[in-house]
Image (cartoon, rainbow, N blue to C red):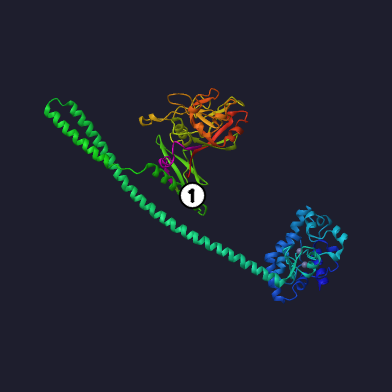
Amino acid sequence: MGNKNKNKGKRFNHNNTHKGRNQNHGKGWNRVVEEAFPAYDDGHRLDRQNESTKTMAHRSNADNGAIPKGSGHGVRSYENQRQVNEYCQKQAKVSSTPSGSRSGNAKAEGGPKLDRNHFGDKERNNKGDREKAPHKSKCLECNVMPTSYCTKCLQWVCDDCARTDHYYSGCNLTSKAEAINQMKKDSVQKACLRRDTMERLLTELGAYDMQLDAFRLTMQTAFECTRKEKGRVDAMLHNGQARKRSINEALQSLENSVNFPESQSGLQELEQFVNEGKRWASSSNILDLKTFSHTTKHILLSSAHMMKMANSEDKTPGMILVSQTVHDKTLLSRMNVEGGRILVYSLAEMDTVPQGTIALPFTSIKSCIDKASALGFLEISCRGKFLGRVLIRMLGDTLRGRQFLMMCTGEAGPSFCNTHFHRVWSKSRPGESIWGGDYEKGDGSGGSTVLKVSNNEKSVPASKHMAVKAGLVSGSYENENPRTIFRVYTKDDVKPQRKSHSSYNSMYNAHSFSKEENIAKDTSAFGMVENGLDVFETALICDNITEVVIHACGVVIEAQ
Ligand SMILES: [Zn+2]
Ligand SMILES: [Zn+2]
């Protein structure tokens, strides 16, 4: 039986590629199948054949370049015709000759693709025919019923292939029944594990679903409560303004009173208004603003995350766009969720607004940002090549810092987006710095201020007095209306005795340096590069610094 199979297998292969040498030339394909599946009657065999042509024949032919001969079975003939066609196409590809048909030629047979899958002449001569596995262990693909399974090679093999191909040390043959049983056991175990994991996930998802419901309902309640509270506060604001006006008017009339009765009634009136003002003040409770800012930020972060996750499964993804009206124009900006934070890109005019967009007023973004420690970002490229993203942290609340953030968000109209750097100072020397931020002229002569300092903001310092250090970001030097120009130091500007300020924290205390003569200071500092200083180092390699462009900018909303 073994030898018979072997010959048959050989014939099967050689039928196609070495057919001239085939001694059993007259044996048909159906005969091969009969021998391959001796236990099956004709009907079964046809089924089996159908099944195998569906699942395996295609791969088998692709691998072996086999052309099974036609047979009496209709389905099989059809398949075989297809296989012949495939083979012809393949031959044509391999040999690039139009004669790549069943008759074949030496060139095509010797092609590298065929050699890999067939017993090449060379190998055959060296080792002899008898030692060859008839199906090269592709017994299933060759429609030969396997008898055992090699657990090392993970192959179903017939007796002959088992004997010739799997008698090496390391190969481990098990009987068909044993192998199937083992496979069943493994599959069952795998399925049970998967099912258990899914069960755990289902429990988690169920809890998440309930949490989402709770969140949504709480948010609805919060919405109602906020609306009510806003009604109270609006009324109080209105009331307070009126009371203030009354006191002013009473003061005026008292001042204008010329006789005793006028003065007396004026005094009474004023006292009445003062008392009313006192009552008003005592009822003007407000909740902690910081808590609100924190809550708003977390709700925004959660919302952006939920939107991102929901979008991944949705054919019509929604989008949250930040909107702000500047000079009667609606500016929009996109938000990107990245890890535990949101990048809010600069506002700009947008031609088309995608469907399903939710517009979030920019004030919501602003309420999440603590000016004193806000994080701005610049995305930098050179000649169209993305160099990286630079994160710049504000060093406390300063007017120059506020302006820098306004230029990152574009909330006042202009932004740093699509502006370029214009100058490098002290190149390759201590205190080296790169200048940018001129949104008007691009050469450092423009960059009119976008700040509108109200009376309440007069107490905010213009900038910080800081020792120069790589990463320090400072503004232009004007005392009044500082321009949007900024510079980033890329090298320290300190002389040898640096030990006295080794602590990073001391950087924030300008006084600790005042005694030191050797340290250069910048009086208009406002920020520090937190990440991406190397981007500037790469940018500085660019011959022409004006080719280094801020192609995107914005602010980061962080979880903490
Ligand atoms: Zn075999
Ligand atoms: Zn093996």
Which of the 4 image quarters holds residue 216?
bottom left
- Give me the residue at 33% from left, 50% from top: 225
Q: Where is residue 106 in the image (x, y as percent from the top left)?
A: 84, 56
Label 1 environment density (alpha carbons within 10 Å; few <14, some 14–19, many ≥20): some
Q: Is residue 64 above or below residue 492?
A: below
Q: In this view, does 105 lie above or below 51?
A: above
Residue closest to the far front: 500
The residue closer to the viewer here, 484 or 372, is: 372
In which quadrant will I find the N terminus? bottom right
- Give me the residue at 46% from left, 59% from top: 207
The residue closer to the viewer here, 38 or 293, is: 293
Quadrant holding ligand 1?
bottom right
In the rendered image, is residue 355 in sight? no
Q: Does the magenta portion include 209?
A: no
Q: Is residue 238 above or below residue 488?
A: below
The span shown in magenta is: 358-376
Which of the 4 image quarters holds residue 177?
bottom right
- The residue that disc 1 covers is 305
Left or right: 459, with 199 as reference point: left
In the rendered image, is residue 224 in sight? yes
Q: Position of residue 162 (x, y in %)?
A: 78, 67
Left or right: 329, with 144 as reference point: left
Q: Where is residue 353 in the image (x, y as percent from the top left)?
A: 46, 44
Secondary structure category for the residue under label 1: helix
What residue type is disc 1 on?
His
Which of the 4 image quarters holds residue 540?
top right
- Give me the residue at 50% from left, 52% from top: 309
